[in-house]
Image (cartoon, rainbow, N blue to C red):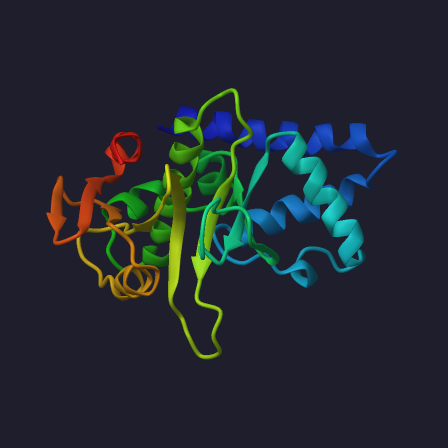
C-alpha cells in the first residue's frame, strides 16, 4: 500500500511537470490551479471563481478543455431528463468534473485510505465523493469504445430543492437514474422523486449492499455497477 501511494505521488508530480509543455496555450500555473480545483470540487458543481484567482472564466474554460482533451478530467453535464436523447437538453452552467483516477484523488487530497475504508465519521463526506467518482469511472469504462463517452446527472431546477440524481443512463427509449451510496444505508428521496416525476420504469441504487431490489429500484454492489448497467 505504501509503495502504491509513493507511485501515485510521483504521478501527480509528473503531471504537474508536464503542464509546462502547454505554456504557449495556457500558463502552467493556471493548469495546476484548475486541475487542483477539479480535485477539490470532485463530484460537485464546478465553481469557476474558485478555480483561479488570476484568471477569468474564459481562461478557466480553456484550461478545463485542455485537461479534458488530455484525459485527466471528465465532465458530467446536467440534463433536464425530459426526454431522449438524455444529452439533448443539458445545462453547461451546472457541470461537474471527475478526475481520472480514485487513487490520484485520494493522494492529492492527502486522505488516509485506511480511515476511508473502515471509518464511519471522520472521512464520511470524502468517502461518499470517492464512491461517486468510482461509479462514474466504471460507467465510462462500460461505454462502447467506438462512441464518444459522456456522463450526465440530474438536479431539480427549482429554488429550495435539494433533489439530485448522481448519474443518468439511456437504454433504448428509457432514462434510468442511478443513485450512489458509500455505505449500506441512506434514504432514496431524490431517486423516488425523480422516478415519480419522470415516470421511470425503474431505477438503480449502488452501494455496499448485496444484490437486491426495493420495489422498482434495483440494487447492485459498487463493485458490480458495470454489470448492473449492462443488464439494464
Q: Is residue 41 left or right of residue 4?
A: right
x then y, percent, for residue 102: 43, 37
Figure quadrant of residue 194: bottom left
Decide which of 85, 128 is in the foreground and name it.
Answer: 85
Above or below, comparing residue 33 to residue 146 in the picture: below
Residue at far top of view: 146
Image height of 156 relative to 91, above or below: below
Residue closest to the eye, 145 or 66: 145
Q: Residue at x 50, y 29 (%)?
A: 8
| Quarter of the rendering containing residue 154 | bottom left
Q: Name the quarter where the N terminus is drawn.
A: top left
Q: Residue at x 39, y 52 (%)?
A: 166
Q: Position of residue 104 (x, y in %)?
A: 49, 35
Q: Residue at x 78, y 39 (%)?
A: 28
Report whether 86 appears left or right of 94: left
Quadrant position of the C terminus in the picture:
top left
Where residue 176 appears, as percent x and y from the top left, is 33, 47
Q: Residue 52, how many percent across, how many down?
A: 72, 56
Amino acid at each position: 500500500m505504501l509503495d502504491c501511494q509513493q507511485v501515485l505521488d510521483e504521478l501527480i508530480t509528473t503531471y504537474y511537470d508536464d503542464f509546462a509543455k502547454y505554456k504557449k496555450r495556457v500558463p502552467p500555473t493556471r493548469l495546476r490551479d484548475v486541475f487542483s480545483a477539479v480535485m477539490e470540487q470532485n463530484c460537485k458543481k464546478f465553481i469557476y471563481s474558485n478555480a483561479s484567482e488570476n484568471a477569468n472564466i474564459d481562461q478557466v474554460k480553456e484550461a478545463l478543455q485542455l485537461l479534458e482533451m488530455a484525459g485527466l478530467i471528465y465532465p458530467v453535464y446536467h440534463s433536464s431528463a425530459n426526454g431522449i436523447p438524455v444529452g439533448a437538453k443539458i445545462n453547461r452552467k451546472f457541470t461537474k468534473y471527475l478526475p481520472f483516477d480514485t487513487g490520484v484523488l485520494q493522494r492529492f487530497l492527502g486522505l488516509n485510505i485506511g480511515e476511508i475504508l473502515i471509518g464511519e465519521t471522520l472521512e464520511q463526506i470524502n468517502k461518499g465523493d470517492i464512491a461517486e467518482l468510482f461509479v462514474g469511472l466504471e460507467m465510462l469504462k462500460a461505454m462502447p469504445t467506438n462512441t464518444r463517452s459522456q456522463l450526465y446527472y440530474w438536479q431539480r431546477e427549482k429554488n429550495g430543492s435539494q433533489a439530485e440524481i448522481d448519474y443518468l443512463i439511456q437504454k433504448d427509449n428509457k432514462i434510468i437514474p442511478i443513485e450512489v451510496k458509500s455505505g449500506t444505508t441512506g434514504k432514496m428521496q431524490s431517486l423516488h422523486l425523480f422516478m415519480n416525476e419522470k415516470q421511470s420504469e425503474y431505477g438503480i441504487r449502488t452501494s455496499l449492499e448485496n444484490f437486491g431490489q426495493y420495489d422498482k429500484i434495483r440494487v447492485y454492489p459498487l463493485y458490480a455497477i458495470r454489470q448492473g448497467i449492462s443488464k439494464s
